[in-house]
Image: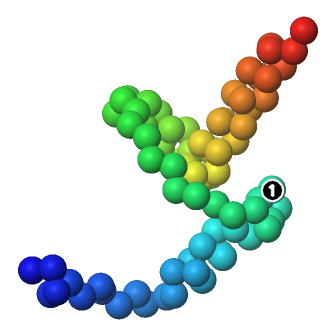
Amino acid sequence: MQGNYQPLARPVPFDDVLRQQNKTAKTMGEPLVMLSLRIPVSLKTRLKTTAAAHDLPMQRLLREAIERELDRLDDTDEP
C-alpha cells in the first residue's frame, strides 16, 4: 500500500494560500503556523458566537485574545 499513495491535486498552490493569510497589517511578512489545541466545546461555541456577533473571523479573534493574555501576563511578571 505504501507505493499506492497519490496526493490530491490542489486547486490553488499551497504557498499561495499561506501568502493570502499572511497579508494582514499585524503579520505582514511574518510567517504563520497552524496551532492545534483541544478546548472544551463550550469555549469553542463561545468563540464562534462572539466572533459572529462582532463580524470577525474566529482566527482573528483568537489571535488577538492570545496576544492580549500574553501581554497581560508579561506585565504582571515585571517587578
Residue found at the far front of this picture: 2
Residue name at image x 65 percent, y 45 percent: 63
In the displayed structure, does residue 30 sit left or right of residue 41?
A: right
Residue 26, quarter of the rendered image: bottom right
Query: Which residue in the protein does label 1 denote?
Result: 26
Residue found at the far top of this picture: 79
Q: Indicate the amino acid at tag 1.
A: Lys
Q: From the viewer's perspective, is residue 61 above or below residue 42?
A: below
Residue name at image x 24 percent, y 88 percent: 6
Residue 56, percent from left and from top: 62, 52
**Closest to the observer: 48 or 54?**
48
Residue name at image x 74 percent, y 70 percent: 23
Asked whether residue 74 appears in the rendered view, the answer is yes
In the displayed structure, does residue 18 sit left or right of residue 36?
A: right
Residue found at the far right of this picture: 79
Q: From the viewer's perspective, is residue 59 above or below residue 4?
A: above
